[in-house]
Image (cartoon, rainbow, N blue to C red):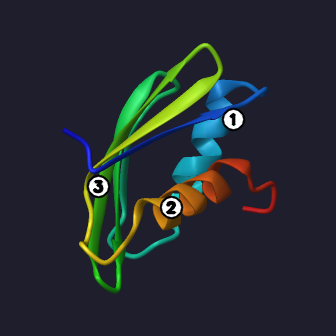
Amino acid sequence: MSDCRFSFPFNENAEILIARAKKAIMNNDGATFEGNESAGNFSLSTPLGQVKGSYSIVSNVATFDITEKPFFVNCNLIESKLKGFITSENI
């Protein structure tokens, strides 16, 4: 069961989207990212603790399931950060 779940539609190649997300996530100390243009797992550290989750991509929709998060880190903040990771052109 996930703590949070959200989906983002996208119009570009899934490989580009995942490369962008991986680069952004891996810019954080203690982060991990494993996966490809279909599915994978990731984790990253926050000052309050680890955020862990998985993703899947089907028909130009990226779905993220957050499986572990600090109690005081809300789903809206995580969603905003992940959306920034996959949409930022300046990473």
Q: Which one is earlier in the sequence, the residue at label 1 or at label 3?
A: 1
Where is residue 14 drawn, in percent x and y?
64, 26
The residue located at (34%, 73%) in the rendering is 45
For label 2, the crowd category at 10 Å Cα-Cα, with few meaning under 14, some 14 to 19 and many 20 or more, is few
Q: In the image shown, does 43 or 1 lie closer to the viewer?
A: 1
The residue located at (40%, 67%) in the rendering is 74
Give the distance between the C-alpha atoms of the residues marked 1 and 2, in whole angstroms. 24 Å
Three-letter code, disc 1? Ile
The residue located at (47%, 61%) in the rendering is 78
| Residue labelled with disc 1 | 16
Where is residue 50 drawn, in percent x and y?
26, 69
Where is residue 35 drawn, in percent x and y?
40, 34
Q: Which one is earlier in the sequence, the residue at label 1 or at label 2?
A: 1
For label 3, the crowd category at 10 Å Cα-Cα, with few meaning under 14, some 14 to 19 and many 20 or more, is many
Residue 52 is tagged as 3
Three-letter code, disc 2? Asn
Q: Which one is earlier in the sequence, the residue at label 2 or at label 3?
A: 3
| Residue labelled with disc 2 | 76
Which structural element holds mark 1? helix
Three-letter code, disc 3? Lys
